[in-house]
Image (cartoon, helix red, strand yellow):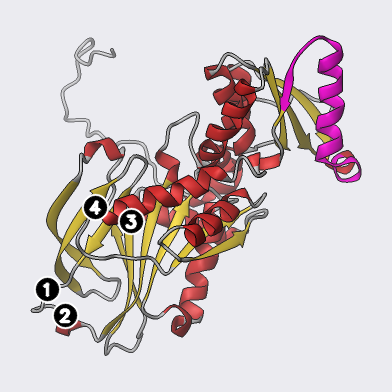
Amino acid sequence: MIVMLSVSNSSPKPHTLLLLGLLISPPSLLTSSLSATFQLQFTNGTSLICPITLRSGSRGILVEFRMTSGTCGVFERICYVLLLQRDDLSGMQLSGNKVRKLEFLMADAVAQGADCIITIGGIQSNHCRAAAVAAKYLNLDCYLILRTSKVLVDQDPGLTGNLLVERLVGAHIELISKEEYSKIGSVTLTNILKEKLLKEGRRPYVIPVGGSNSIGTWGYIEAIKEIEQQLQTGTGGVKFDDIVVACGSGGTIAGLSLGSWLGTLKAKSKGLGYAINTSEELNFVKDIAAATGVVLDPVYSGKAAYGMLNDMAQNPKKWEGRKVLFVHTGGLLGLFDKVDQMAPRVKNWSRMDVHESVPRKDGTGKMF
């Protein structure tokens, strides 16, 4: 969990960002709640002591903080509070927002007697990787249609990032060029493969792009219930005004919006689009990781967080006084596909310098 505050004080820069790297994972380390006092360090050099209460749920930890009366005078007002929902901590192979959707989609596949699943996405699709792992857990075969460039469509796709996990768990991979994909469409492509498998005597179950349909949407309707339950365990009356999340196929934001509207939270859900990352966004991902230990992916959560914080800086009045929950949707493995772009940003290495006066003797160091 990270807590971020924007505060207004008398300094020349009125909207100072607090970044508190408070990392507790997995949530099982916290059985119910824990109270402690933390020193919060602001980027303008100011520090503040305040008590913080941590409350755990089945998939995340909420942080509640209160400034004591003796320290409130340091700042005129809190401009916004930003908390991070760590849905990236739901597992290694099966991490991220896709797990919540797949919980319902896979249950439907099993209920319908399927012996295999079909789904579709990009060459580094987090959804396809999660679907492949989930299928294996349920003893179902998995068929993935992955789009790639026309230059690479006839080549072995390799073992980078999500592809490594997919191929390790035995997923059957069908490559399609981006050009063909755009002309044919995901629905037709999955139906073509479905008909082929039916003729072979298989019982396939088709999962749409991103797991986003009426069934998958229930994953984040339930997530809102989970957040509400966490909030109810405390006495501080914390309530979010906004929920911000990266938006791709739309199932996550749909579930969050419906769940919030149907429940007691009534927060505004805001989806920020995904796309190919920019150089500035990669720098942002690197800086957040170095400052907090939280690794954002470059296409979804990293891009969305970058856009959100930029908007907060450029339009402070819009966010003033609001409590914001940002949902980290996972995607760590996709970062491995960006190693060439990240390499110039992580040059923090050197050969260790050991003076010649240090005694050396063969066999001293055991290499276990």
Read off the residue under disc 1: 68
Q: Is residue 16 magenta?
A: no
**Which comes sooner in the sequence, label 4 or label 3?**
3
Q: Are marks 1 and 2 in contact (CB under 8 Å)?
A: yes
Q: Secondary structure at mark 4?
A: loop
| Chief SS of the magenta region | helix
Q: Position of residue 154 (x, y in %)?
A: 84, 26
Residue mark closest to the camera, 3 vs 1: 1
Residue mark closest to the camera, 4 vs 1: 4
Q: Classify 10 Å Cα crowding around label 1: few (below 14), some (14-19), many (20 and above).
A: few
Range covered by the magenta-colored residues: 181-205
Residue mark closest to the camera, 4 vs 3: 4
| Residue 265 as seen in the image, left or right of residue 357 | right
Read off the residue under disc 2: 72
Read off the residue under disc 4: 233
**Amino acid under disc 1:** Thr
**Which comes sooner in the sequence, label 4 or label 2?**
2
| Residue 64 as seen in the image, left or right of residue 114 | left
**Amino acid under disc 3:** Ile
Question: What is the C-alpha distance between the residues marked 1 and 2?
Answer: 6 Å
Q: Classify 10 Å Cα crowding around label 4: few (below 14), some (14-19), many (20 and above).
A: some
98 vs 226, nearest the viewer: 226
